[in-house]
Image (tube, rainbow, N blue to C red):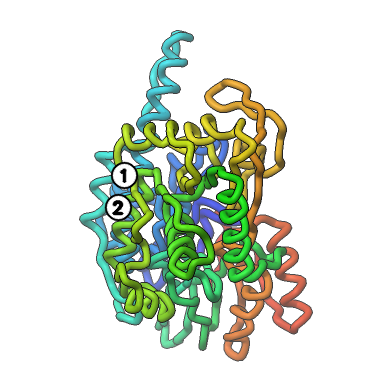
Amino acid sequence: MRVSFHGAAQTVTGSQHLIEVSGGKLLLECGLFQGRRKEFYQRNSHFAFDPGELDAVILSHAHIDHSGNLPHLVKDGYNGPIYTTPATAHLANIMLMDSGHIQESDVKYVNRRRAKKGQPPVEPLYTMEDAALVAQYFQCLPYGGEFEPIPGVVAHFVDAGHILGSAAVVMDIEENGRRRRLWFSGDIGRRDLPLIRDPVLPEGADYLIMECTYGDKLHRDPEEAFEELREVVSHTVKRGGKVIIPAFAVGRTQELVYCLHRMMDSGDIPSIPVYVDSPLAVNATDIFRAHPECFDEETREFIAQDRHKAALGFDHLTYTRSVEESKALNDRKDPMVIISASGMAEAGRILHHLKNNIENPLNTILIVSWQAPHTLGRRLADRDERVKIFGETYERRAEVQTIGGLSAHAGQLFLMEYVQATRASLRQTFLVHGEKKAAQALRAKLDEVGIKDVHFPELHSSVVI
């Protein structure tokens, strides 16, 4: 068996891992590499393998850095099955369509600039029409349901606890009379996150391919984040302001809605209007509602006892679908919570809400996720006194608060627990989906507890196991 690491190798995006067994070729993930524009097109336009020679694809979850290059894979000749969970297929469909729309829009902007310079136009990596073609290849299986993606490999999904429908992939492989278990973690979640079940720990794995995004970080307890959210909302409402939250449309938005629902039902915060203002988030929330089989026991009990019989719907919550509804919020002066995308405040409706509320000291801008360098979200998290929005400079008079305990990725301690759960059978571990600093820190910690043979493979490197 040969494993080749063609993406998310010594970086955190563009996950692609090729498994070759007995002449069959299986691709784990087909994510977009996310980076500067030139590198984005260079890396994502060319595969390190022939898509037409693949026999199967397995998708762990719907995030674009894991699923986002599937339209290009199909466009380049792949026409086989894409195995995944039902919720992931449902979410991936809307996220890929949204990605296609973004790429078409970006190319229109780029081509206007190129036309002014007399340069020829460029094509998008893929379009919405290309993205729509992917859905026909999804083959959906429940957690625990066995399937044979290629001869000699029997696989099944277990809960990864990262986002709705996320899974680790367990592959029992027989080749040349040898039997081995390869466990691919996908993105590993955390215990006690809102809505979804906890991650399943590995067992009986001979080889582990594992993400290490936060291999150097210790996460705070999600319950602490819940209390911090309650305090921020209460404090802002008391002084008559709005809470403006840039949030990722899939996962983070739904967690926030559920937390606010619980707080209002228990009387921990006043009953004020809550608006979710992001078309993708609204569509994603509909998909969350359609897949209660993914909810944890606490959420099921909450729904059973709740008078609304819903986790993501309550009296004071409004999902805005039209531009007109979104614009109408600008004229409102009463206390409210507005959750809007994008999560790093680089595009989307959140920019309009920030523009209209950033200079009012009664308001709070709440940052609930990691913000990449050079983004508006990072400048807000750093509490810059002046920021540019749509090319205009604004004085930041609104209060800025950050909450760090809502990450959907496992921190160092849980990553350690994840590996140690299967140490009795484990021969080798391969760390992917992480930067060098995170991987080195995790390797050092694993070495301290006697777990050796931990590798951090380079891009396009291969290993025979």
Q: Residues within 10 Å of mark 1 (few under 14, many from 20)?
A: many
Taking 180 as reference, is 293 left or right? left
Residue in the image at 34% along x and 60% along y: 313
Q: Nearer the viewer, residue 5 or 391?
A: 391
Above or below 43: residue 191: below
Residue in view at x 44 percent, y 13 percent: 119
- Residue depicted at 61% across the width and 40% down the height: 362
Q: Which residue is mark 2?
A: 93
The amino acid type found where label 1 is placed reads Met
Camera sees residue 153: no
- The numbered mark at residue 97 is 1
Residue 262: mark in rendering: none
Tag 2 and tag 1, C-beta contact below 8 Å: yes
Closer to us: 41 or 65: 65
State the image quarter where residue 399 is shown.
top right
Image location (x, y in percent) of residue 185: 50, 71
